[in-house]
Amino acid sequence: MPQSPKTDARIWTDVTLLTMATGDAPYGLIEEGAIVAKEGRIVWLGQATDLPTAYCDGEKISCDGHFMTPGLIDCHTHLVFGGSRVAEFEQRLTGVSYEEIARQGGGILSTVRATRDADEISLKASATKRLRQLQRSGVTTVEIKSGYGLDLDNELKMLRVARALGENPAIDVFTTFLGAHAVPPEFKGDADGYMDLVCGEMLTAVVRENLADAVDAFCENIAFSPDQVARLFTKARKAGLPVKLHAEQLTNSGGAKLAARYQALSADHLEHLDEEGVKQMAAAGMVAVLLPGAFYTLREEKLPPMELLRKYQVPIAVASDSNPGSSPVLSLALMINMASTVFRLTPEEALAGVTRCAAQALGLQDRGQLVVGLKADFALWDISHPAELAYQVGGTLCTSVVKDGRVILTG
Ligand code: DI6
Ligand code: FE
């Protein structure tokens, strides 16, 4: 029997909405608001006094005066991995640099060894724990990369685990193939030879098994050159996959310009990005993904070029980069704080960075704002001013998470 519109609508009331929709008031703020979801989508929002009578009989959920934002989107993570890098953290505290550790065969390669040794069940179990923490910070969509397998079987294993995590109705997972994350020990000194494997057998299998929604690479002097990345991006685009790039994290290698040539979704990190790179990102319609957790953990000193990104109107996303080496971060809410305090984004820019602009960084048009027709993915916050989301350091302000119109976390 068809359900009447009254019965399956769910209405959140007694709430301040931060819609994050473009062109509206700051934050898209609506006081004394209400929002209605049906079949997983937003069907109405506005001031509670204007609620259409058609929805008055629906199931009502009072938000006790809390604030609602779109569900947060973490558009850059390496959440699936084996082992731990805590010993390396201690080593770095004694003055050894991240690059030195990588050159000595530690760093990413130590996680590669542990990930190769782990089976899918244990990888899924450890990633699930981390994912739960992110969800508690208001996340409803997460991107997860491969990149710690670095051979055919282990890259596919990582992507299968990421896809399996996305079977949970409480979270959407966007998967990214990052086979070109580092040169594995079997190819030491032969990055070109390894790139042949990534562009050939590995990419073919990833596409055949539909395991990835995008392709990423690490363009850096300790990883792959722009020419090597270009070979991969040409193949990826031919296979119909969008690309994105770890670029200008430790040095200015020209990665962002290369990514722009392939209309990449985003270039990520970007501390060493120059004006020409910013211009080309703007022309290609790319998003700049800033990762304050990695900047903080590695005690970097060079800030990303915020003023240039604003000047050329490049949308700015903010993500956790959650990974065992450079960013052991499990809260996207904390990244709102760090994006403001460390990168000097305004609180509104930082919130847009984990909602509207993060959706754009994943090419997802159906989320990231509270707008009629988009997914009913919400996070509720016990705050009394929107800037508190950026002001608070740590703790848990998120009181409830709604995914596709269903309450999945409270308290
Ligand atoms: N840049 C990063 O910050 C992560 N990957 C990358 O290319 C670090 C990954 C790790 O250290 O394990
Ligand atoms: Fe990363």
Image (spheres, rainbow, N blue to C red):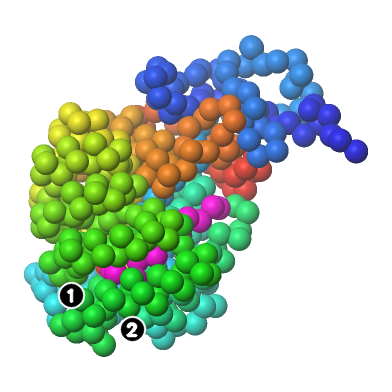
Q: Residues within 10 Å of mark 2 (few under 14, many from 20)?
A: some
Q: Residue at x 62, y 16 (%)?
A: 48
User: Label 1 vs label 2: CA separation?
Assistant: 13 Å
Q: Is residue 150 left or right of residue 153?
A: left
Identify the image quadrant of residue 389: top left
What kind of element bears circle 1? helix
- Badge 1 crowding class, 10 Å Cα cut-off, few under 14, some 14 to 19, many 20 or more, is some
What secondary structure is marked by label 2?
Answer: helix
As drawn, is 42 to the left or to the right of 326?
right
123 over 373 or under it: above or below: below
Q: Is residue 175 magenta?
A: yes
The kind of residue tagged 1 is Ala
Q: Which residue is mark 2?
A: 113
Q: Is residue 279 visible?
A: yes
Magenta part of the chain: 171-181
Residue 102 numbered mark, or none: 1
Residue in the image at 18% along x and 81% along y: 190
Q: Nearer the viewer, residue 9 or 239?
A: 239
